[in-house]
């Protein structure tokens, strides 16, 4: 908790129970939940918290780089408590999102340098496939 107080203080964020709840939840999972999933998971502990409040807390936390927003396509926003640069893969069957670790796509920035008239700063690579569980289900 002390740690969290320090982190929020560094970012000049007011420690509201909602922000703490959302941040802690994201730090405790690597499931890349949507705002609705976070809202539903927190509902029993925070019955007065609305979905709009969850959205607001998420927006604030993204703005100060404590969490990251992942857009896996079609306006399907997911949230990640891991702010390190990493890629994601989404299951086309169940929609789960996992981290792709151990591979870096930073050299892509260099590769497209000659193709665009931009100073390339970053990229975000998404993969799509069928997760282990869904492969099993589909095979049965
Ligand atoms: Zn799946
Ligand atoms: Zn992630």
Image: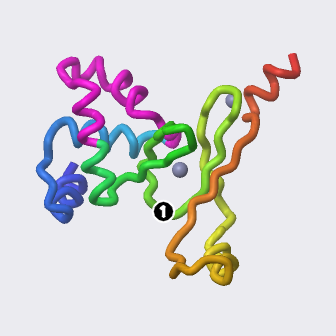
Specify start and end residues of the magenta stretch as a single range: 30-57
Q: Position of residue 54 (x, y in %)?
A: 28, 34
- Residue appearing at x 73%, y 27% in the figure: 133
Q: Residue 132, located in which quarter of the rendered image?
A: top right
Q: Nearer the viewer, residue 15 or 117?
A: 117
Q: Nearer the viewer, residue 7 or 87?
A: 87
- Residue appearing at x 48%, y 62% in the figure: 84
Q: Position of residue 28 (x, y in %)?
A: 42, 41
Q: Residue 41, located in which quarter of the rendered image?
A: top left
Magenta run includes residue 125? no
Quadrant placement of the C terminus = top right
Q: Position of residue 50 (x, y in %)?
A: 23, 24
Q: Position of residue 85 (x, y in %)?
A: 52, 63
Q: In screen coordinates, is 59 left or right of 69?
A: left
- Residue appearing at x 42%, y 27% in the figure: 37
- Residue appearing at x 47%, y 35% in the figure: 33
Q: In screen coordinates, is 49 left or right of 34?
A: left
Magenta run includes residue 55? yes
Q: Secondary structure at mark 1?
A: loop
> Residue tagged by mark 1?
84
Q: Residues within 10 Å of mark 1 (few under 14, many from 20)?
A: few
On screen, residue 37 above or below 125:
above
Q: Nearer the viewer, residue 72 or 4?
A: 72
């Amino acid at each position: 908790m002390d740690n969290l107080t320090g982190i929020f203080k560094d970012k000049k964020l007011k420690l509201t129970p909602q922000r703490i709840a959302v941040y802690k939840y994201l730090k405790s999972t690597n499931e890349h939940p949507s705002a609705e999933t976070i809202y539903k998971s927190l509902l029993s502990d925070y019955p007065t918290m609305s979905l709009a409040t969850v959205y607001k807390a998420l927006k604030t936390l993204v703005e100060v780089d404590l969490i990251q927003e992942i857009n896996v396509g079609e306006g399907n926003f997911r949230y990640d408590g891991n702010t390190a640069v990493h890629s994601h893969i989404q299951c086309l069957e169940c929609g789960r999102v996992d981290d792709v670790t151990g591979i870096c796509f930073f050299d892509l920035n260099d590769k497209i340098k000659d193709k665009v008239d931009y100073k390339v700063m970053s990229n975000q690579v998404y993969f799509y496939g069928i997760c282990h569980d869904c492969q099993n289900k589909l095979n049965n």
